[in-house]
Image (spheres, rainbow, N blue to C red):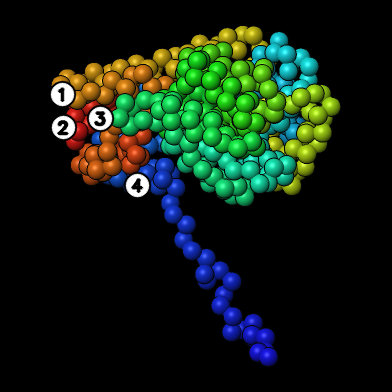
Amino acid sequence: MNAPQSPSLRAPLLSTVPLAPSDPILGITEAYVADQNPKKVNLGVGVYYDDAGKVPLLECVRRAESERLKAAPPRNYLPIDGLAAYDRAAQELVFGAEFAAVKEKRIVTVQAIGGTGGLKIGADFLRQITPGSEVWISDPSWENHRQLFEAAGFTVRSYPYYDPRTRGLDFPGMRNALDRLGAGAIVVLHACCHNPTGVDLSRENWSEILAIVQRRGLIPFLDLAYQGFGDGLESDALAARLFGGAMSPVFLSTSFSKSLSLYGERVGAFSLVTASPEEATRVLSQLKRIVRTNYSNPPTHGSQLAAGVLASPELRALWDRELGAMRERIKHMRRELVTKIKQRAPGVDLSSIVTQRGLFSYSGLSKEQVQRLRKEYAIYAIETGRICVAALNSGNIDYVAQAIAKVIQ
């Protein structure tokens, strides 16, 4: 029998830890920051910028924060499930105060650390109650979807979504793939402003997907990170209300990062539509255990600001106007980019950029073209061709259009 190895002869504990690959988006930002070209443009980051190239502080948020600071409230612990006024406001924003499941107290909502935190809470809960399920995400999807559900212990697979030939939705492929899944499969769906493509389902598409989910016994998990950036707060809640009004359970993650420009405050929520108030009570008890063992309870400031904006009719109306202006500026940048590229490259058709919605666009640029943009023009984008349209402004759009026209011809 071999003697136990001496502790002094063992390899150091951390010596075999491999270097993890760089995050595809954050890595681009690091390279952009290091670039010395004064004309550099970062189209990779998923953040809304105003026409001056700055992350805006919304006036509705500034006023809510001013009132909060005047009151000088203590910074005590919040309950495990978060600020009650915030949870209620976040729930009613998505579903509406008169929504049947809201009035019947069948929807559980807990404050989360951003939209990612909401996804994580839901993933951990699903792992507890249906550990043998597979998770299905769109192809392509937000990079963190796969990593997050794999980290929770799930096998993650992809269903067709984007058609590169039409630069639009591959709905037949999506529908057929979902209609072959076995009962209990978890399907992650982008409720609006699909990240990374900007290609969304129509109302008719959503109705068909709901019918498949119900018929096949699938578990829907909606990711609603961009409510208000598609067609408006009410319209962008279509999928959540459609599913939540027809079935349970329905899992939902939401975020105020973009819509209230509260990125650093990490203000999100996780909601779950249940079958009864009694079921909701049991589910909440388990969600609170997940939160307690993860980060104990959420932070106060961002949730207080969001709740303050949503609770005040004046600030809520101001937010609607500010959010509408952000949404329209993005749409204007889409039209301007396509027009300016067309002027410089008449044979190039990138009109799909105009029909896509939200912050992002699958531009149709190839990996090689993206690399040329970076090398020759210091314009940074994701190698898939995804660009953040909100990073365009009146000061850089001519330069970007000229560069894209050069590399794409």
Circle 2/circle 1 CB separation < 8 Å: yes
Cα separation between marks 2 and 3: 14 Å
Q: Which mark is residue 31?
A: 4
The tag earlier along the polypeptide, 2 or 3, is 3
10 Å crowding of disc 4: few (<14), some (14-19), many (20+): few
Q: Where is residue 198 in the image (x, y as percent from the top left)?
A: 41, 26
Cα separation between marks 4 and 3: 18 Å
Q: Where is residue 340 in the image (x, y as percent from the top left)?
A: 22, 20
Kind of element beneath mark 4: helix
Q: Which of 160 and 371 is in front in this view?
A: 160
- Check disc 3 and report the residue beneath it: 400
Quadrant of the image occupied by residue 388: top left
The tag earlier along the polypeptide, 1 or 3, is 1
Kind of element beneath mark 1: loop
Kind of element beneath mark 3: helix
Seen in the picture, residue 208 relative to 174 is either above or below; the reply is above
Q: Can residue 45 be seen in this view?
A: yes
Cα separation between marks 1 and 3: 18 Å
- Check disc 1 and report the residue beneath it: 347
Q: Which mark is residue 409?
A: 2
Kind of element beneath mark 2: loop
Which residue is at a point 63% across and 25% down the rendered structure image? 214
Answer left or right for 312 relative to 158. Answer: right
The tag earlier along the polypeptide, 4 or 2, is 4
10 Å crowding of disc 3: few (<14), some (14-19), many (20+): many
